[in-house]
Image: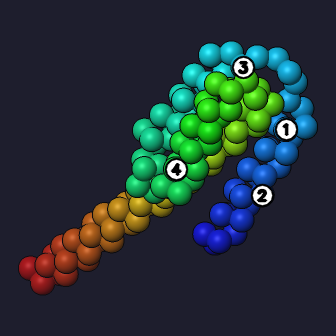
Amino acid sequence: MARTRIAFVTASLALSLAAAVGCASGTRIADKEVGDVELSIRSAENATATQHAKVLLDRARNALSAAQSERAKGNDGAARARLEEARSAANAAESQARSVRALEEDAAMRRQIDEIERRIREFNVQAQRG
């Protein structure tokens, strides 16, 4: 399941990058565009991507850094493509982190339910004896 998810994310990133390169115009990149990607990365970090989606989060950070470098050189098309890659990787990292957290919470709830059911059984046994 994890391999399928990683393959899907990789394919999505590749398609996003290709679309961004194909659609990139010669317009300057606004500070807001960079800021929006930085916010996407922070959102992923807040969703525990640092622990649960480190590879994707690192990819987002590296792509953002590359975008800033390309932007500084005046390579706006390449910068925009790298920004889109960073945004896609950050969104994928956040989704993966939230998914892992949901699975962990589900497992914790199942343990609690099992414990409650065990206590109920013990109570019923005690009630039948006494």
- The answer for how far apart the CA atoms under marks 1 and 4 are is 21 Å
Whether label 3 touches label 2, CB < 8 Å: no
Residue at which label 4 appears:
58
Residue 87 showing in the rendered view: no
Quadrant into which the N terminus falls: bottom right
**Nearest the camera: 118 or 100?**
100
Residue at which label 1 appears:
21
**Mark 3 or 1, nearer chain start:** 1
Q: The residue under label 2 is which amino acid type?
A: Ala
The secondary structure type at the circle numbered 4 is: helix
**Mark 3 or 2, nearer chain start:** 2
- Residue 80 at x, y = what percent? 74, 31
- Residue at position x 61%, y 30% from top? 68
- Residue 90 at x, y = what percent? 59, 42
**Nearest the camera: 116 or 105?**
105
Q: The residue under label 4 is which amino acid type?
A: Asp
Residue at which label 3 appears:
29
Density class for disc 1 (Cα within 10 Å; few <14, some 14-19, many ≥20) is some
Which residue is farthest right?
Answer: 22
Q: Is residue 46 left or right of residue 17?
A: left
Where on the picture, by quarter, is residue 26? top right
Q: The residue under label 1 is which amino acid type?
A: Val
Q: The residue under label 3 is which amino acid type?
A: Ile
Density class for disc 3 (Cα within 10 Å; few <14, some 14-19, many ≥20) is some
- Residue at position x 18%, y 73% from top? 123
- The answer for how far apart the CA atoms under marks 3 and 1 are is 14 Å
Quadrant into which the C terminus falls: bottom left
- The answer for how far apart the CA atoms under marks 2 and 1 are is 15 Å
Density class for disc 2 (Cα within 10 Å; few <14, some 14-19, many ≥20) is few
- Residue 25 at x, y = what percent? 87, 24
